[in-house]
Image (cartoon, grey):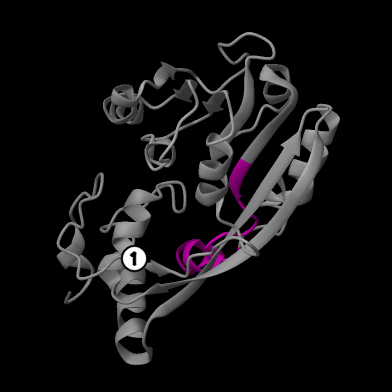
Amino acid sequence: MTGPGACDRKAEGGERSGLRRRPTTRRACVPGPVNQAGCVRHGLGRASAALDVQTGGGEVLAGAPVLPPVTAATESWPPNAAKATVLLHPRGVVVVADPDEPPLPFADAAFDLVTSRHPVTVWWREIARVLRPGGTYLSQQVGPASAAEVYEFFLGPQPSGAGGARDPETARAGAEAAGLEVLDLRLERLRMEFHDIGAVVYFLRKVIWMVPDFTVERYRARLYDLHRLITTRGPFVAHSTRFLIEARKP
């Protein structure tokens, strides 16, 4: 890449859009750091009925070697719902288009496992309602100030309380208020490395809420500043935060 202008292409799905490399992240693994996918696969192997809320493209369920006899997923964004349907229907999973607002389109006590990876919102009372007694909710969520180094480079310092809704203790309080017992809550901070400006553009086009008004033209000058920083000092380093919460319905 010679500069920001070389990367002004739309990146969708898994397409790399001509980039040499995407940002790299140190992956966490269980036990210890956060790895929801591994925990979900373990839980799915023991469940009789499971629900994946805000499934995205269905990748987490698709990666499980064994699914319960009854498995459903919800998704609000039509392109993701279509992708999840293609990926999961062959495995017997029902994908339901849902607006991510209560109520969930399922009966009370329908599932013994509810999962969600990076949910935008969590309706704790709905989670508790659709869980059977003894059932488990397992979710990996975006933590506070995730990748703050990236968005603050472009937007400047942000209010310190802006990430309060992403605080793990806020999640604990929400779960407990809904009558769930929190069994596990762990936070992990993961190192991200951007090796060229193309990786930064790719990231901001994929994670569109990071810098909501991002375009290459609008941020050309700041992109060029970051390009020079990377070429003279090496990879631009940021840190994503994730937390894993496991809760049980008594």
Q: Is residue 65 left or right of residue 178?
A: left
Image quadrant where one finds the N terminus: bottom left
**Residue closest to the eye, 17 or 47:** 47
How far across and down, in percent of the image, does residue 146 sit?
57, 59
How far across and down, in percent of the image, does residue 105 sit?
55, 11
Which residue position is annotated with label 1?
200
Residue lying at 34% horizontally and 26% vertically, measured from the top left = 91
How far across and down, in percent of the image, does residue 173 sit?
82, 40
Is residue 150 inside the magenta stretch? yes
The residue most toward the bottom is 232
Residue 29, compared with residue 105, is above or below; it is below
Marker count (numbered): 1
The residue most toward the top is 107
Q: Is residue 35 visible?
A: yes
Circle 1 crowding by C-alpha within 10 Å: few under 14, some 14–19, many from 20: many
Residue 57, compared with residue 8, is above or below; it is above
Residue lying at 34% horizontally and 62% vertically, measured from the top left = 219
Image quadrant where one finds the C terminus: top right
Q: Is residue 139 left or right of residue 175?
A: left
**Residue closest to the eye, 182 or 6:** 182
Residue lying at 23% horizontally and 68% vertically, measured from the top left = 4
| Mark 1 secondary-structure assignment | helix
In the image, the segment drawn in magenta is: 139-157
Q: Is residue 118 visible?
A: no
Classify residue 246 by image quadrant.
top right
Q: Is residue 15 left or right of residue 221?
A: left
- Under mark 1, the amino acid is Val
Classify residue 194 by image quadrant.
bottom left
Residue 100, compared with residue 201, is above or below; it is above
